[in-house]
Amino acid sequence: MGTPVDQLVDLLDLEQIELNIFRGRSPEEALQRTFGGQVAGQALVAAGRTVDGGRPVHSLHAYFLRPGVPGVPIVYQVDRIRDGRSFTTRRVLGIQQGRSIFALTADFHLPEQGGIEHQDPMPDVPGPEDLPSALEEVGSKLGELPPFISRRQPFDIRYVDRLRWTKEELVGVEPRSGVWLRTNGSLPDDPLIHVCALTYASDMTLLDSVRAPVEPLWGERNFDMASLDHAMWFHRPFRADDWLLYQQESHIAHAARGLARGQIYDRSGQLVVSVMQEGLFRPLSAR
């Protein structure tokens, strides 16, 4: 089976079954739905496989249309929307059991020089070496890890703020969260693998910022949560097997939906990726 990182790379290695058609494996899990980060990462692989190597992806916009079924393969159909002089656009539809479950549009840009340079500074937070691994911290507290934890095993994730376990600890907590993350081992040098691995990881913790003021991130859940859409902008090259700081905040939660924004920095302080996601939050008591 290999290490969790080997399994992640294998998960992102799609089978090409026609010129613009790819098939991705979906792991067998005892969970309600396929992990959204997996579907987004695989769809981006499918798009990237149809683009000349000199044009890295600069943005993606995606919608989760239906929950995927764990253990059932997903077919990705790529539509070659545009091949321009500077930009290449691809549209990808993820299909499972004859139904569309995911739609993604990705844009690729031939690198060029610009005349404007600025970015938000990286927050001053403890480094990853000074923080415990989330899996170690959660495992020692709960005794056993939740079933969805298998999705996180390819990554070393370390929360910047201490984890809270009771509602009493949530008093005064703001809707934001931050983690350091990197893969639990080296990845191949292919830049597309690093981009798609981070796309996978970007869906794991972003909605924590919406939940932070109302329920412990790792305690008993009061809400059924699902990703609705996801957008990413890739500003600079990076490696997903080097430490990256993922700062996340939510500006609004209303009408059973919460919106979160993420900024991802490398160790040198460069802002390498921006992320936006809206999630659905339904109280479990409403079932």
Image (cartoon, rainbow, N blue to C red):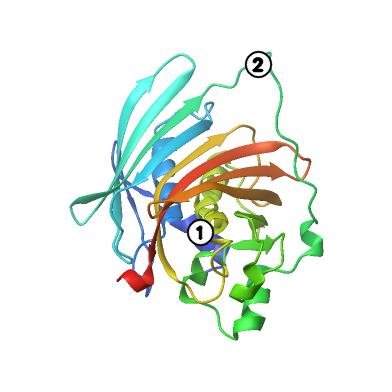
Callout 2: helix, strand or loop? loop
Amino acid type at mark 2: Gln
Around disc 2, counting alpha carbons within 10 Å, would you say few (fewer than 14), some (14 to 19), or many (20 or more)?
few
Image disc number at residue 113: 2
Counting residues from the start of the chain, the first of labels 1 and 2 encountered is 1
**Residue 81 location, quadrant:** top left
Around disc 1, counting alpha carbons within 10 Å, would you say few (fewer than 14), some (14 to 19), or many (20 or more)?
many
Q: Is residue 94 left or right of residue 243?
A: left
Q: Is residue 6 left or right of residue 272?
A: left
Q: Residue furthest bottom?
A: 143
Q: Is residue 9 left or right of residue 124?
A: left
Amino acid type at mark 1: Leu
Image disc number at residue 45: none
Q: Is residue 271 left or right of residue 147?
A: right
Q: Work out whether 81 lies above or below 132.
A: above
Q: Work out whether 15 lies above or below 213.
A: above
Is residue 184 something that shows in the picture?
no
Q: Residue at x 63, y 74 (%)?
A: 168
Give the x, y percent position of residue 137.
68, 75
Q: Residue at x 55, y 59 (%)?
A: 208
Callout 1: helix, strand or loop? helix
Foreground label between 1 and 2:
2
Is residue 216 something that shows in the picture?
yes
Give the x, y percent position of residue 201.
54, 54
Nearest to the observer: residue 66 or residue 166: 166
Q: Work out whether 41 lies above or below 162.
A: above
Measure how far apart labels 1 and 2 are at the Cα level. 34 Å
Q: Residue furthest left?
A: 98
Q: Residue at x 52, y 71 (%)?
A: 149
Which residue position is annotated with label 1? 8
